[in-house]
Image: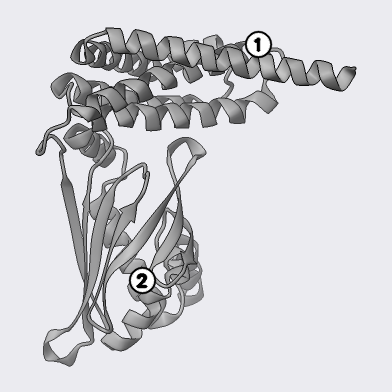
Amino acid sequence: MAVEAVERSVTDLGRRAGSTLDEIRRRVDTVDPERLARALGWLSIGLGLAEIVTPRLVETLTGIRDRRGALRLAGARELATGIGILSRPRDARWLWARVAGDAMDLALLGEALPRSNGTTGRVVAATAAVVGVTAIDALSADRVGRDAKPGDEIAASAGATVTINRSAAELYRFWRDLRQLPRFMKHVVSVEPIGDRRSHWVAAAPAGTRIEWDAEIVEDRPNERIGWRSVGVAAVHHAGSVRFEPAPGGRGTKVTVELRYHPPGGAVGAFVAKLLGRDPAQQAQEDLRRFKQLVETGEIATNAMRADAKEAAR
């Protein structure tokens, strides 16, 4: 009997959740998509300002503790997304950026739940509210995306070059073994090959969260060039390439990385990313510098290692 009661409860819960989602979908379909997008844009701006200016109040209302830095970072993201939506309300990528932000907020709340002694109710209530908003954001983005026109997307690009005192063949072999990439790519946690050309990537994201995506190699010229692109659903759709060319004067190999991507929040999101120290061009240059150190010396110099070297010299 107890098992049957549990089964009935689970079935009823699933029925209610499905009914609620259907109701949200019906309501979303009755509202003008541009008007709804603008409302979500103003919601992002209001929430972003609250998280930046009054993070302590947000902590009190949501039950989150000691995460003001993460809240301010989330606030900057909300501001960028809100401005983007208001500037281009019929560009679905701005709305999908809200969905990605909702996922980060849910991760933050999930992290806070085990430490919410005395505030569990507020964390659960905030989580339920974010889940509801996520459904609205996703349905709105899907609806706007159906009417998307070519040219609505805002693409960005970045690149970096470094000369390495190693042969092109050696550098190509190192880079082509994708499991090696997290050794010098700062924000990449892991890369697992799926067959010869596909791979699964995990990267560190703001507020202690992680994002994952699949990528495929679309161009592979041994010792010369590797090109790739993200496939399927990705938090940031991107494509890129790395070239290996002989350096002038026989000084090794010139390595050039080029990236093309659609930042969450479009051009505004890219600008905020620079302010937060996450400019892709800067990251690419730093990653290439670490790549150079790794293949030339076998290790990457850190601040601690430099301090030890200075001490030894003294």
For the point 37% across and 25% down, which residue is it?
138
In this rendering, the label closer to the viewer, 2 or 1: 1
Residue 74 visible in the picture: yes
On-image quarter of the N terminus = top right
Question: Which quadrant of the figure has residue 42?
Answer: top left
Question: Which quadrant of the figure has residue 174?
Answer: bottom left
User: What's the residue type where badge 1 is placed?
Assistant: Gly
Would you place residue 165 above or below residue 283 in this image? Answer: below
Q: How packed is label 2: few (under 14 Cα within 10 Å), some, or many (20 or more)? A: many
Indicate the secondary structure of the residue bearing disc 1: helix
| Residue positioned most to the right | 1
Residue 166 visible in the picture: no
Would you place residue 112 above or below residue 291 in this image? Answer: above
Residue 146, percent across and down? 23, 29
| Residue positioned most to the left | 151
- Which residue is disc 1 drawn over? 121
Residue 176, percent across and down? 37, 75
User: What's the residue type where badge 2 is placed?
Assistant: Phe
Q: How is the image coloured?
A: one colour
Could you tell which of marks 2 and 1 lies nearer the N-terminus?
1
Residue 94, percent across and down? 25, 29
Q: Is residue 90 left or right of residue 165?
A: left
- The Cα atoms of the two marked residues, 2 and 1, are separated by 48 Å
Mark carried by residue 195: none
- Which residue is disc 2 drawn over? 291
